[in-house]
Amino acid sequence: MDAERENAQAKRESAATLELKHLRCLVAIIDTGSFTDAALQLGISQAAVSRTLAALEQLLGVRLLHRTSRSVAPTTAGVQVLARARILLTGADELVREATTGHNRLHIGHAWSAFGHHTTEFQRRWHDQHPETELRLIRHNTPTGGLAEGLCDLAVVRAPLDLRPWSHALIGHEARYVALASDDPWARRRHIRLNEVSSRTLAIDRRTGTTTLDLWPAHEQPAVEYTQDIDDWLAAIATGRCVGLTAQATAAQYRRDGITYRPLRDAQPVPVHLIWRTHDPHPATHTAIALANALYREDRSASGSVNSRR
């Protein structure tokens, strides 16, 4: 009867879909070197280890292990399955950790430059004031900085974006800068005026950039070369064939050989927002907003002090 029950169990398992227990069993057998030790590691019987492996081999339609009375080694197919199994198990373990400790970690996404020249100070103050919540900054080249893709808890947004689907807070404004090749004649100037840019070819990132042609009247718009991300944008500018307009944060975060930044006159500053999902926000969301607001407010205070002395 025991043999019949084991055969019935094996048939049920072989008819099932792939499960993590199948992969954990294979990894345990290889890592421990025997079915007996794998059973001890997994806390199941040796018979259950054999059944689970047989179910996996039947499900995949390949033999995964060479077995002798003294050793166990993966077949060629087994080596490939083992490598993939480790990746999947690591991902599953990470998913569990993220779900169970998610509120102990805050992910802030951004497309280009996080908090600009405030980034390091934001990280330092967060670490000092909120050590119980780990902070991670994530760069993701989408309009929402990874928020729509589920990669972060809130995101820094500068690009023109319909904010209605998200909860959002304005944390500050940043001046606009012109990015140009360091050997460009404009690099010798202290600033550039907006109407001058219309005579040049402008590099624009349509997905995540802060610049649109709406800055100019229709009859004065510059020629455009579209780019894919920040690295593509910088590379096009470094050749000298294009210039770019961007927020001050880019000038702070992306200092590159061959690229010079100059202030842009006669243009409205770039608004900087933090956005987050309306439902089930991270508990630290408003704490992060308050800290970002404080840093940008310090900028405004410093600027006001300078102006008052003039």
Image: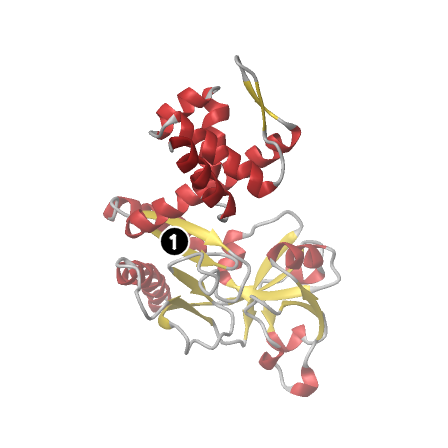
Q: Which residue is mark 1?
A: 107
292 vs 109, nearest the viewer: 109
Front in this rendered view, residue 178 or 85 = 85
Extreme residue in the top direction: 70
Image location of residue 176, percent across then percent down? 52, 68
Going 61% across and 59% down the picture, which residue do you hit?
Answer: 229
Q: Decide if residue 196 is on the left or right side of residue 111.
A: right
In the rendering, at what x and y percent does residue 252 appear? 50, 54
Crowd around label 1: few <14 · some 14–19 · many ≥20 (10 Å): many
- Residue 256, position in %: x, y? 61, 49
Query: x and y percent of residue 289 in the render?
Result: 31, 63
Front one among 102 and 130? 102
Name the element at disc 1. Answer: strand
Residue at 51 percent across and 52 percent down: it is 253
Q: Is residue 292 visible?
A: yes
At horizontal 65% and vertical 61% (from top left) the residue drawn is: 228
**Screen quadrant of the N terminus:** top left
Residue 169 vs residue 181: left or right?
left
